[in-house]
C-alpha cells in the first residue's frame, strides 16, 4: 500500500511540475507576442508636410493618431486625411477611418474612404468606397471594392476602380449603374 501511495504522489508531483512549466511557457509566449504587437511610439493629432525637389508642397498628412510598428514595418493611422498638391495648390484629398502605411510606399485606407476633388470643373467631385490603396510613387489609387463616383449631375455605381492622378484618368472595372440628375 505504501508503494502505491508513493507512486501516486510521484505521478501527481510530476504532473504538477509539468503543468506549471507548460503554463509558464504559455505566459511568456503570450507576453512576447503582446510586446511585438505594441507600437514603438504613438503620435496624436499628427500633421506632416512633404515637399518636392523644388521646395513646393506636394502632400499633407493629418491624423488623429499614428502608431509606429518597427518590427511589422508599418505605420497605422486613425482618421487619416492625405492632401495631394499640384502647383502648390491642394488638388485631391483622400480620407478614411483607418489607414496603414507600408514600407513599399503604399497606404491602404479602410472604412468610409472618401476621395474629394478640391478643384472645380473636373471630371468627378467625389469617390467613396470601403477600401482604397494609394501608391505614392505612381500616384495611383486602386480598389476592388464597391465604389460610388459622383460629379456635377451624375452618380456612378461600380465595382473596382483605378485612378491615375498624374494622367487624370479613371478606369471603372465593373459598371453597375449611373444616375443622372438635372441640376439648376
Image: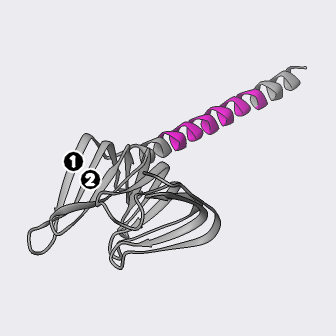
113 or 121, which lies in front? 121
Tell me residue 20's x, y (percent): 62, 32
Residue at the limit of the structure toward the bottom, as seen here: 167
The reply to whether the C-beta atoms of the residues labelled 2 and 1 are less than 8 Å apart is: yes
User: Any magenta on residue 23?
Assistant: yes
- Residue indicated by mark 2: 61
**Quarter-wise, where is residue 6 in the image?**
top right
* Tag of residue 4: none
Q: Which residue is located at x 59 percent, y 60 percent?
A: 145
In the picture, measured across the screen, residue 159 lies left or right of residue 70, that is right
Q: How many residues crowd around disc 2 within 10 Å: few (fewer than 14), some, or many (20 or more)?
A: some
Tell me residue 93's x, y (percent): 33, 56
**Quarter-wise, where is residue 141 in the image?**
bottom left
User: What range of the chain is rendered magenta?
Assistant: 11-31
User: Which colour assignment does the render follow?
Assistant: one colour
Q: Which residue is located at x 76 percent, y 27 percent?
A: 12
151 or 174, which lies in front? 151
Q: Which residue is located at x 33 percent, y 64 percent?
A: 121
User: Any magenta on residue 72?
Assistant: no
Mark 1 falls on what kind of element?
Answer: strand
The numbered mark, 2 or 1, whose residue comes first in the sequence reads 1
Mark 2 falls on what kind of element?
Answer: strand
- Residue indicated by mark 1: 47
Question: How far separated are the C-alphas under marks 2 and 1?
Answer: 6 Å
Compared with 164, 3 (above or below) is above
Amino acid at each position: 500500500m505504501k508503494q502505491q501511495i508513493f507512486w501516486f504522489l510521484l505521478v501527481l508531483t510530476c504532473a504538477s511540475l509539468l503543468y506549471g512549466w507548460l503554463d509558464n511557457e504559455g505566459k511568456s509566449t503570450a507576453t512576447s507576442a503582446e510586446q511585438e504587437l505594441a507600437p514603438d511610439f504613438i503620435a496624436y493629432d499628427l500633421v506632416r508636410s512633404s515637399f518636392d525637389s523644388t521646395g513646393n508642397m506636394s502632400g499633407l498628412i493629418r491624423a488623429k493618431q499614428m502608431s509606429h510598428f518597427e518590427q511589422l514595418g508599418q505605420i497605422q493611422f486613425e482618421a487619416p486625411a492625405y492632401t495631394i498638391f499640384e502647383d502648390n495648390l491642394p488638388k485631391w484629398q483622400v480620407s478614411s477611418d483607418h489607414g496603414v502605411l507600408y514600407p513599399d510606399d503604399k497606404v491602404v485606407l479602410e472604412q468610409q474612404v472618401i476621395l474629394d476633388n478640391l478643384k472645380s470643373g473636373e471630371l468627378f467631385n467625389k469617390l467613396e468606397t470601403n477600401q482604397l490603396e494609394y501608391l505614392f510613387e505612381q500616384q495611383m489609387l486602386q480598389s476592388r471594392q464597391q465604389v460610388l463616383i459622383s460629379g456635377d449631375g451624375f452618380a456612378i455605381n461600380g465595382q473596382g476602380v483605378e485612378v491615375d492622378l498624374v494622367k487624370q484618368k479613371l478606369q471603372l472595372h465593373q459598371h453597375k449603374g449611373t444616375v443622372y440628375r438635372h441640376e439648376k
